[in-house]
Image: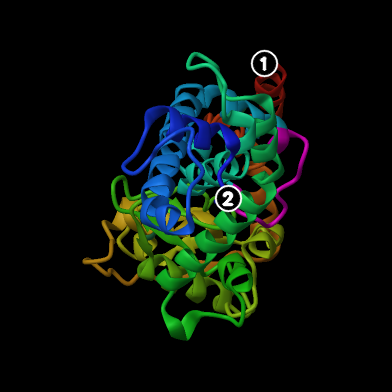
Amino acid sequence: MGFAKGFVDLAIFGGFPGLRLSKRLTDKEWAAMEQHAVEAARRHEQLCLDRFLRKAKESKECIISKYRSWYECRDPGNEFWPPPFDIWTIPAIEDSLVEVLKSNLHHLQGLPHWSSVPDIILDSLVHRFEDIANNHSMSSKMGRLELVPEELRLPSARETLELARTLFVRLSDSSIIRYPRLTDQSDWCWNELGSTVMSDIIILAGHDPNTMTFAQLLEEDIWVECLTCAQADQEGKVVQAVEAVMHCHIDHGADATNKQSVEWRILEGLELVLTRVLNTRIKKWWKCLLCGYESVDNENSVLRHISWQ
Ligand SMILES: [Zn+2]
Ligand SMILES: [Zn+2]
């Protein structure tokens, strides 16, 4: 019947319609009771699966820590692998757990009720982490790509997401999110205003917004002055190109519904050199992929955080 012996024994022990012990069955008698026998064995199998799935969920910390150990010694590169603190929210983890439990039923049969999930099951799950992480990455990228208007997409999801003009806004707090900080599942939408601002600035600076990646934008270290502020007789606001979208949001109240057009001037020559020198102390945002800790810090405090992990 394809059931592990333990479940057949349990089915016989528990009884089912048509079952008579100590009697050799005729083909006809077996045909009449086969369905009941299969159902009884399947019921015991399911009870066992449910019990161990419940136990696995109770010890989810153990699974998180196994994923964390796996994650720590690998480099996600350009993939959006779920960070360890998020792993339990990925439905594929529970689906894989059920599959692993199903294919290891022979290890589970006969284990006492108080038994925890055997190591062999958890180790089989560890072997699936790479597939789980890569599948999650692929579906996350496709999900983000679908947010990008079709006319702004490049041939691959990765190329599109890496562009400097590809950015998203989180509705709950209006924060701007871009590649590669795209792993968390959030209420994101396409940042149309941000994308237009970035494209305008990239063109003004003599580059192509359809090819310039965010990494290249950072590398170029472009600085701009907001002419709209300057013309309004306010102190000319000078920001790094990557901060320009935030400037539109904060100082011009621009958002998806209020599309203020803002004019920019690219800093060049001595003015650019001086601006860069004066702003060398700009701090960077860091996010720890192991625990989700975020901070504006210098490199030393980031290293200190890592050593505390
Ligand atoms: Zn301004
Ligand atoms: Zn951390």
Q: Is residue 7 in view?
A: yes
| Residue in the picture at 49% in, 47% down | 95
Label 1: element kind: helix
Q: Nearer the viewer, residue 74 or 211?
A: 74
> Hey, which quadrant is residue 110 in on the image?
top right
Label 2: element kind: loop
Characterize the local packing of mark 2: few (<14), some (14-19) or many (20 or more) Cα atoms within 10 angstroms: few
| Residue in the picture at 67% in, 41% down | 280
Q: Is residue 176 above or below residue 232?
A: above
- The numbered dot on residue 45 is none
Q: Amino acid at mark 2?
A: Gly
Q: Amino acid at mark 1?
A: Trp
Characterize the local packing of mark 1: few (<14), some (14-19) or many (20 or more) Cα atoms within 10 angstroms: few
Q: Is residue 247 in view?
A: no
| Magenta residues, dominant SS class | loop
What residue does disc 1 label? Answer: 308
Tag in front: 2 or 1: 2
Residue stretch in magenta: 70-81
- Residue 72 on the magenta segment: yes
Would the CB of label 1 be found within 8 Å of ligand 2?
Answer: yes
Q: Which badge, 2 or 1, is on the more N-terminal residue? A: 2
Q: Is residue 153 above or below residue 283?
A: below
